[in-house]
Amino acid sequence: LDIYLHLGIILCHFPAVLFTVEAEQSMYTSEFEESVVMGCKFNPKPSYPHPDLNVTWHWINSDSVQDVIRLDNGVARSESPKYRGRVQLLTEELAEGWAKLKLSSLRISDAGKYQCVVHSADGADYKTIALSVEASYKSVTKHIERAATGDEVLITCQSEGYPKSTVEWQNGNLETLNPNTTAESTPDQIFRITSQIKVSSSEKNNYTCKFTKDGSSATIYIPDEIPLHPAKNDAVIIILCIGVIVAFVSVGVVTYRRRKGNQSVPQFSTDRNAYISCVVLQT
């Protein structure tokens, strides 16, 4: 009897149910500028609203801990300039024992570790959750220009995304080419990748650039997509200018002969009008 009494006294000093917090999942991956909902489950769930229930979400790294949003006395608020207007605690889920954080308009800098901390009258616990933010290389732009010398053309593929991607090139014969690829960081902290190859303009072929992270690609067809050579454009303009000058001179001569004896029309005016027309054509 004494033994059972002693055990009863010991058990009275411990809560009947252990308060725990469990992460819905340990890792979330979401897309740049999209939304994510991260959750942790606490048990036992108190009646809500409950003045003793406090929930805090932190963003943590090796140097600091930053409050994302906090629930105190039934009121959720975020005082962080980084998250203001983009973060929400889904309070309707609290009655079901869920502390869910919704983060919108995701930035690359939002990636990292988040801590879900729950306090109640039954105890306190927390779990750490990781968030990864990626930006797909969705749109690939291509550009073709003639090289300064020779019969070669410079083909460029460009796209933006995160994390950094390599770019592979192949021609129509499935031969791998060696590009010149550079990367720069944008104000949104995503990468702008530019990849270039130089090929012959006289050889009929096609060339495909592929961003390996997402598989986004673009194909360029040579010589079909080569822009008109500037020299040819200049030649056309010169021919048109000569035609315009000849036409103006002819009209001037005819007009002069018709008006001969009445008034004199200086040839300079006709030439000047022709010159102006040429300037307009070249522009």
Image (tube, rainbow, N blue to C red):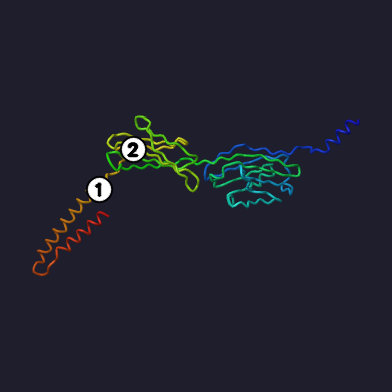
- The residue type indicated by label 2 comes to Lys
Contact, mark 1 vs mark 2 (Cβ under 8 Å): no
The location of residue 71, given as percent across then percent down, is 68, 49
Location of the C terminus by quadrant is: bottom left
Q: Please tell me which residue lies in front, 78 or 192.
A: 192
The residue singled out by tag 2 in the image is 198
The location of residue 89, given as percent across then percent down, is 64, 47
User: What's the distance in space between the residues labelled 1 and 2, CA to CA?
Assistant: 23 Å
Q: Secondary structure at mark 1?
A: helix
Query: Does residue 39 show up?
Result: yes
Q: Please tell me which residue lies in front, 131 or 152.
A: 152
| 249 lies above or below 120 | below
| Label 1 vs label 2, nearer the camera | 2
* Label 1: how many Cα within 10 Å (few below 14, some 14–19, many 20+): few
Seen at 62% across and 36% down, the residue is 26
Seen at 64% across and 43% down, the residue is 100
The residue singled out by tag 1 in the image is 233
The location of residue 193, given as percent across then percent down, is 43, 41
